[in-house]
Image: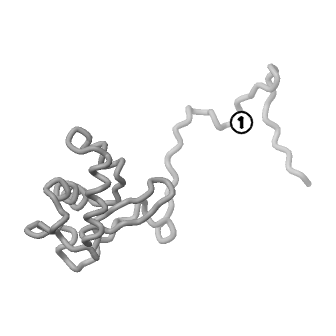
Amino acid sequence: MANQITEAAAMLWRTISKKGGWWSAYRLAREWTPVLSLADIETHLIALWKCGYLAAEFTKRDGSVYAFTVGCIPLPDEQLPAALLTNEFITAKPPRPDLMSSNYEAPEPNYRDGAMDFATHPSLHQGQRFAFKGIANA
């Protein structure tokens, strides 16, 4: 390992690189609290960032967050995550079908028989029954 990287820092690096995404010290503390304190986690994350093993960004919500990105170098004698071993881009499928290039099919109504037939079935208006009167504006 590098001069500042301890075994505890390597464990944090493995967690971030395998699970992916951006991690704050508080988020890592939820998983590593019995083993490492929050101050130790912050110290290890800064050391990993300074040595180039992690990328860092600052967000208003979480403060400093760290991730293993394509620009980072892996720890010595460590395997890269499977997603970073190929040069191909991984594209996510769209969350819903493309409605602009497909035909919309309305779902079948599930009303009871006669529920939408206002002409033959009277309705109630202020407690009194009245029949539907279709009046077109002329």
Q: How is the image coloured?
A: one colour
In this orientation, which residue lies closer to the viewer: 82 or 138?
Answer: 82
Residue extending farthest top: 127
Residue extending farthest bottom: 87
Q: Position of residue 76 (x, y in %)?
A: 11, 70
Q: Position of residue 32 (x, y in %)?
A: 24, 44
Element class at badge 1:
loop
Q: Quadrant of residue 124?
A: top right
Residue extending farthest front: 3
Left or right: 59 as drawn, with respect to 137: left
Residue at 49%, 57% in the rendered image: 105
Q: Position of residue 94 (x, y in %)?
A: 40, 64
Q: Quadrant of residue 133?
A: top right
Residue at 23%, 45% in the rendered image: 36
Q: Residues within 10 Å of mark 1 (few under 14, many from 20)?
A: few
User: Please, what is the three-letter code of the amino acid marked with disc 1?
Assistant: Phe
Q: Which residue is mark 1?
A: 118
Quadrant assignment for the N terminus: bottom left
Left or right: 71 as drawn, with respect to 65: left
Quadrant assignment for the C terminus: bottom right
Residue at 85%, 50% in the rendered image: 136
Q: Report the number of discs.
A: 1
Residue extending farthest left: 77
In this orientation, which residue lies closer to the viewer: 125 or 37?
Answer: 37
Residue at 20%, 42% in the rendered image: 35
Left or right: 110 as drawn, with respect to 134: left
Q: Is residue 92 above or below residue 122?
A: below
Q: Is residue 128 above or below residue 63?
A: above
Q: Position of residue 33 (x, y in %)?
A: 26, 41
